[in-house]
Amino acid sequence: MRQPLLKHTHIIKLGRFLDMLYRPSEIAEEIGVTTDTVCRSYIPAGLPYTRDENNRIWIHGPAFAAWAKATIARKKSQRVPLPDGQGWCMRCNQAVEMIRPTILPATRYFELLQSPCPHCGGTVNRGRARQHPSTVQGEGQGMGVKP
């Protein structure tokens, strides 16, 4: 079964839950998803809940937050970084070999590698820490201040 999608905007809102029981519609409204997402995605994925005598679903707020954080941690632990020399092609949706990449400085500490995809010809990008940082002028140098 696929893991449920929890976006960053949902994760930020986990701290809002009080020590009380919520209906699925209240959980959905609080984090900004539909009730169907809670009922058809989160509950089958293992979200802890209880049912009352009228068969209504109730979700404990801190239990939901703990489940969501555990789900996120599990997803992060399954990530495997791409090996050096490879990038992700968004058109092919796969890792491809970067052939003679062009290095584009993005910021002072970050650079972008660009290469054509060997399969579809689209542009493949990969970011990395800058290999040759620019020389930073010392304090007062180059500003007309004499040492």
Image (cartoon, rainbow, N blue to C red):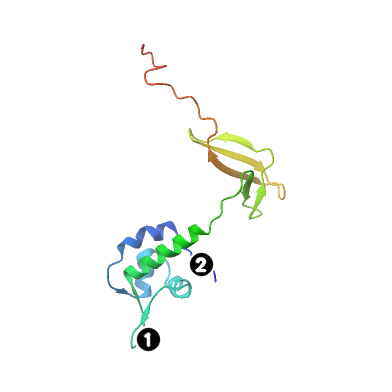
Q: Residue at x 33, y 85 (%)?
A: 52
Q: Residues within 10 Å of mark 2 (few under 14, many from 20)?
A: some
The quadrant of the rendering that contains the N terminus is: bottom right
* Residue 12 position within the rendered picture, expressed as x and y whole percent measured from the top left: 37, 57
Q: Nearer the viewer, mark 1 or mark 2?
A: 2
> Considering only vertical position in the picture, is 88 above or below 109?
below
Q: Could you tell me the amino acid type at mark 2? A: Gln
Q: Tell me where residue 95 appears, x and y as whole percent.
A: 64, 52
Q: Nearer the viewer, residue 95 or 84?
A: 84
- Count all numbered tags in the image, as a single digit: 2
User: Residues under labels 1 and 2: Cα distance?
Assistant: 26 Å
**x then y, percent, for residue 49:** 38, 77
Q: Is residue 83 left or right of residue 3?
A: right
Q: Mark 1 = which residue?
A: 55
Position of residue 45 in the picture relative to residue 101 (left or right): left
In this picture, is 89 found above or below 106? below
Find disc 2 in the rendering and name its residue: 3
Residue 16's place in the image compared with 146, above or below, is: below
Considering every residue shown, the one lying at the far top of the view is: 146
Residue lying at the far right in this picture: please name it.
Answer: 119
Mark 1 neighbour class, 10 Å CA radius: few under 14, some 14 to 19, many 20 or more? few
* In the rendered image, the vertical position of residue 81 relative to residue 7, given as above or below: above
Give the residue furthest to the left: 19
Give the residue at x 53% y 56%. 79
Q: Residue at x 33, y 88 (%)?
A: 53
Secondary structure category for the residue under label 1: loop
